[in-house]
Amino acid sequence: MTSTTRDQTGSRPLGRTARRLIAVELPDGYRGALPRRILDSSYDQIEHLSFRDLSPELIADRGADTVLAPLLTKTFDAVELAEYLATQAFEGMLIIASEVLPNAKLVQREIARSAPGLNVELFQLNQNAQDLREV
């Protein structure tokens, strides 16, 4: 697990209103390609975790606003993650990053359908320009 907090660099202190993002098994190549509006300076803390480390206590205690993960890994897929977050009463946003898909809107709907009430966004990696685009 790695964690970056802005208060360690002299910026805003963490508190109840601090914005937190949890990146779950996000590949290094995706980290550099994400749009600034996802990994922007408005997050006070960004934690990089494995799926196994994503415990109910961590979700509740850390008060994450956003969970960011790839569509598919060797450990989990986006549907499993969405279902898990829904069972933990996660109220933030789930952002899924993926390579270009033939029918991205269908994939996004299926992920959202697996966890009613969860706010799900899907971003695709544009293979030509190496940047993500929103579905």
Image (spheres, rainbow, N blue to C red):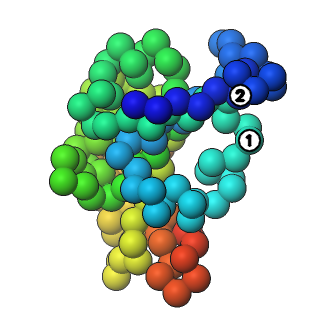
Categorize mark 1 by other alpha carbons within 10 Å: few (<14), some (14-19), many (20+): few
The image position of residue 109, as x and y in percent, is 36, 60
Is the Cβ of the residue at disc 1 closer than 8 Å to that at disc 2?
Answer: yes
**In this view of the protein, which residue sits in the foreground, 56 or 74?**
74
The amino acid at mark 1 is Ser
Q: Secondary structure at mark 1?
A: loop
Q: Is residue 111 left or right of residue 100?
A: left
- The residue positioned 70% from the left and 47% from the top of the image is 40
- The residue positioned 46% from the left and 12% from the top of the image is 61
Residue 94 image-quadrant placement: top left
Residue 20 image-quadrant placement: top right
The disc label shown at residue 41, or none: 1
The image position of residue 5, as x and y in percent, is 64, 27
* Residue 120 in the image: above or below residue 66: below
* Residue found at the very far right of the displayed protein: 11
Q: Earlier in the sequence, mark 1 or mark 2?
A: 2
The disc label shown at residue 6, or none: 2
